[in-house]
Amino acid sequence: MRALAYVLIGVLGGIGVMMFSAGASEQPLHSPPMGYAMAAPEPDDPTPWTGDDLLEMAKIYDQQADELQMDAVRIERRATSLMLKPHMDPKGFQRTSLMHVASSRWKAAKELREMANMHRAEGQRLMDDKKVG
């Protein structure tokens, strides 16, 4: 029995050493990736955004919001089809999770629309200032 305990400790220790040496460059699962937390380096010569740049960004935000809305509608249709076939999801867990995902897509699309409107208004203001000045 004591030999089995020593073997088990040795195996677990070996796995730990392998994970430590192999995972030294990787981040642990519970910590967020650092790429999202780090600020982007600013160039030495920062140039301000032009009105055209902001209007182009607004178009991109609108396109992304459209994609999210289409995805949300597709997910809601899938959840509705599960409601019509109760034998496919007897406890409703899958339908509920699909509705949560759809609502998060709707929320993200709304936020993108707000950003697009903000960029569009600021871009239009800069273009109007450029025409006047």
Image: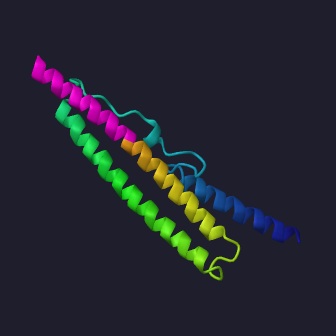
Residue 35, by quadrant, is top left
Q: Is residue 117 magenta?
A: yes
Magenta stretch mostly in which secondary structure?
A: helix
Give above or below for 115 relative to 14: above
Depth check: 25 or 35 in front?
35
Give above or below for 108 relative to 94: above
Q: Name the residue furthest bottom.
A: 87
In which quadrant of the rendered image does the C terminus lie? top left
121 to the left or right of 114: left
All told, the count of numbered labels is 0
4 to the left or right of 55: right
Give above or below for 44 relative to 31: above
Q: Is residue 71 magenta?
A: no
Q: Is residue 8 visible?
A: yes
42 to the left or right of 112: left
Depth check: 120 or 15 in front?
120
Depth check: 33 or 108 in front?
108
Depth check: 25 or 122 in front?
122
Counting from the top left corner in percent of width and height, residue 63 is at 30, 52
Taking the spot 69% from the left edge, 77% from the top edge, the residue there is: 90
Taking the spot 53% from the left edge, 59% from the top edge, the residue there is: 101
In which quadrant of the rendered image does the N terminus lie? bottom right
Taking the spot 87% from the left edge, 68% from the top edge, the residue there is: 2
- Which color mode does the image show? rainbow
Start and end of the magenta stretch? 114-133
